[in-house]
Amino acid sequence: MLQFTGHPFIDVGLAAIAAYVGKSRIADLDTADLDQVARYIEQNYVRPPLRGHLTMAFTSNAWFAQDAYNPDKPGLAAAQRAERQTRRNEWARRHLRQWAKSGATGGAGSANARQDAANAGKEGDDPANANGATCVFTGLPAASLELSNKLAPGRIGRAQMPLLQGDEAINFFTGGVPGLPIAPEALLALQFMPMACAKVGASLLAVHADREALTLDFARSFLNKNLKDIAALQAAGEDKFPTAPRALKTLLVEELLRIERDRRNEERRNDRAASITAYSFNNGKDPKLEIYHLPLQITRFLQHVNTPTYLAIWEQIVERAWQQVRAKSGKKGAPAADATPRVNYLFEDLFTLPQGAPRFVRLYFLRVPRRAPSEEDPRRGYSPYRERDLVSWPLVALFMKEVMSMDDAYIEQIRILGDKLADYTRRQGGKRFFRQFFTEQNTSNFLNLLSKTNIAYVRLTQGRDVLFDLEGYLAVFMDGTELMRPDWRLARDLVLIRMVERLKDWIAANPDTLPEEDVQSGQAAEAVPVE
């Protein structure tokens, strides 16, 4: 019985196997499933486009890519082709079918798998674990046959697992013995792992979650896309594997939201959120690894915004964060170049959270524009006046709770203060107050404004109410009893969001309430605050 190991490459490979054979649990895999995957690899890894594409994962020394094993190389005699074919078949069997002898997975397996085991025995291979080693990933017995001419039996190097060292390096291996011992089942998972990765630029993207079902969902999505592309390329005789049309972070979030929509449509509402870690790697001439993480609080927020309560407004905000790409006219009557955007700036900025929450709130929820050099950046045109319909207190309250971990009492204090200030703006403060409250960046001036407004509000209500009592004032704006909170501007922006939502009709009737130059001036002051 197989199960997730905690290692992203192994787990994504196991998820790819399950997705390929149409199973929803790793534990349900049996030898017939492994045989089905092994046959796909045998038939497709040795031909374009995968023969070249997968060197990104396994280097050009992989068994299917080595020129010395290629029977189709031009100029070979028939005997040479046969000899090369035999050698490649042998290395394929060692990488893909040693599990047929181990019996670690359930099920009787296929007749083909049993025949492969018999063939291995005829060739003098010892079906038992020759060196007594244990797989470092699964705890199962390690493979018994050599996987490289330079490594001990059952041990893998960089040609089998991305980002390992070369076959003769001894550093960082237990006991100074090169390579890692691996079970045949885990080795097959490694071989199939790139099929569940997206190609993004010159790297592969593997997505691993701390919930098995979500890892399976990502693997299934990327695998299905890859299988479709491979079939189309093989039919057309093409050998260049296409890269994803989206930037890495944008692709990751877009795919997560699609998975959540499918989950909702399938009424899998009990599926819990999970943290996600994405690995962007290349194991070729210039090996590299970049790791991207979406913590639980972010994925839980994304799960909530896909519910009917928030979905409509969320989708509008997302839509206005896409890169603005103009189609370029083709030369001499050729069709225009594709204008598909690669980047969604909101998706990209999710990876700055929760640390970047103040900027995120002001930019996407309050719609304060960003000074950007690129004309493709839509955030240059954001406007709290023109886009006031996108300002949503329920969405921001969800963000405060899930992403910023604010308690319900604090969120309620922000809401009450926003309601009172909106009422004050309508009845007495007017444009001047609203503009000053929106744009003020100096701490002392803002404190004075709050004090004067509180007094004016008491007069307005004829002593029946105050903007805030001492407890509420300290909770929202103060750090202790003497110092303003370092993030007081964030608190002010949250109050403003509630105010704008309550004042949308008033703002529409007063188009000069917040001139664009005032917003830009406030933005510039915020970049270098004057204390």
Image (tube, rainbow, N blue to C red):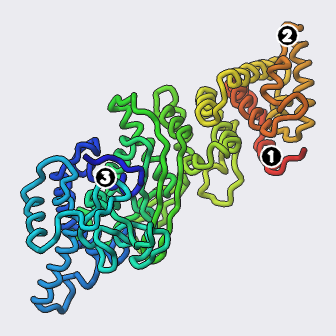
Quote the CA–CA distance across marks 2 and 3.
Answer: 67 Å
Residue labelled with disc 1: 526
Q: Whole-percent x and y of residue 105? A: 21, 50
Return the x and y of residue 246 as percentages of the image width and height.
Answer: 46, 57
Determine whether the residue tagged by mark 3 lies in a helix, strand or loop. helix
Residue beneath label 2, please? 461
Give whichever of 412, 42 is nearer the camera: 42
Circle nearer the viewer, 3 or 1 = 3
SS for tag 1? helix
Helix, strand or loop for disc 2: loop
Q: Can I make out residue 477 in this image? A: yes
- Left or right: 125 as drawn, with respect to 352: left
What percent of the width, then of the height, locates residue 262? 36, 37
* Residue type beneath disc 2: Thr
The 10 Å Cα crowd at callout 3, few under 14, some 14 to 19, many 20 or more, is many
First in residue order: circle 3 vs circle 1? 3
Apparent side of residue 530 relative to residue 269 in the rendered image (left or right): right
The residues tagged by marks 2 and 1 sit, at their Cα atoms, a distance apart of 33 Å
Q: Residue at x 30, y 58 (%)?
A: 186
Earlier residue among tags 2 and 3: 3
Amino acid type, label 1: Glu
User: Where's the C terminus, which quadrant?
Assistant: top right
Q: Are marks 2 and 1 in contact (CB under 8 Å)?
A: no
Q: Residue 339 at x, y = what percent? A: 47, 59
Tell which tag, 2 or 1, sits nearer the viewer.
1
Question: What residue is shown with label 3?
Answer: 14
Q: CA distance from mark 3 to mark 1?
A: 49 Å
User: Going 91% across and 18% down the picture, which residue do you hit?
Assistant: 455
Can you tell which quarter of the image residue 518 is in? Answer: top right
Q: Nearer the viewer, residue 228 or 101?
A: 101
Mark whose residue sits in front, 2 or 3: 3
